[in-house]
Image: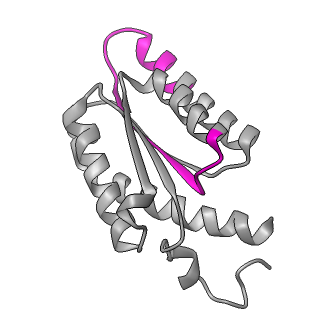
């Protein structure tokens, strides 16, 4: 079993990793909080600031194309998607949530690169506020752990 003989601590060592982050600007107070929590956790895990690339896109539907551009560069060990979609009164919520999520997953599989998906999909602003810090932190941890796991497997 991968990682079994080393324990799991090494999976959260980000010292030698390069991470790309794509942040949607729509609902920016939430996505800024996601980003700051994610960045703080990446730095706490040892990822060097110079090895973290951060770009902003207009909204969640634009996140996958920026992730794809980063994946094609082959400079990153893992990527992180940050965004916030809050249900409104129309079908647009489902469209954006489903398509952005599917795009992130497809890119991860097509490029065989871990992508931590922290595009929040919530019913209310209050739910988004309640999740912004934990999900940003979680995304950083997922990216670092999955980068190591894929390195071990590959």
Specify the quadrant that holds the N terminus.
bottom right
* Scheme of colours in the image: one colour
Residue for point 55% across, 29% down:
64
Query: Relative to residue 3, is residue 62 drawn left or right?
Result: left
Task: Indicate the position of residue 8 as horizontal and vertical percent values.
Answer: 59, 82
Q: Is residue 77 magenta?
A: yes
Compared to residue 97, the image places residue 17 above or below, namely below
58 inside magenta stretch: no
* Image location (x, y in percent) of residue 141: 46, 64
Q: Quadrant of residue 48?
A: bottom left
* Residue span colored magenta: 73-98
Q: Nearer the viewer, residue 113 or 122?
A: 113
Q: Quick one: 151 or 72, which is closer to the camera? A: 72
Q: Residue 45: x and y, percent?
A: 41, 73
**Picture quarter containing residue 126?**
top left
Which of the image's four quarters has the C terminus?
Answer: bottom right
Is residue 134 visible to the viewer in this orientation of the structure?
no
Furthest residue to the bottom? 5
Q: Residue at x 61, y 29 (%)?
A: 103
Q: How many marks?
A: 0
Q: Residue at x 24, y 38 (%)?
A: 30
89 horizontally vs 51: left or right: left
Q: Is residue 75 above or below residue 68?
A: below
């Amino acid at each position: 079993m991968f990682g079994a003989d080393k324990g799991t601590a090494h999976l959260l060592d980000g010292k030698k990793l390069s991470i790309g982050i794509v942040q949607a600007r729509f609902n920016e107070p939430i996505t800024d909080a996601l980003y700051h929590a994610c960045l703080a956790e990446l730095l706490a895990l040892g990822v060097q600031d110079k090895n973290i690339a951060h770009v902003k896109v207009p909204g969640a539907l634009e996140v996958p194309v920026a992730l794809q551009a980063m994946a094609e560069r082959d400079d990153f060990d893992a990527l992180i998607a940050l965004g916030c979609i809050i249900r409104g009164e129309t079908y647009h919520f489902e469209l954006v949530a489903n398509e952005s999520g599917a795009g992130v997953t497809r890119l991860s599989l097509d490029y065989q690169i871990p992508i931590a998906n922290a595009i929040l999909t919530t019913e209310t602003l209050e739910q988004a506020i309640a999740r912004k810090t934990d999900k940003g932190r979680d995304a950083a941890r997922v990216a670092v752990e999955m980068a190591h796991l894929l390195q071990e497997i590959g």
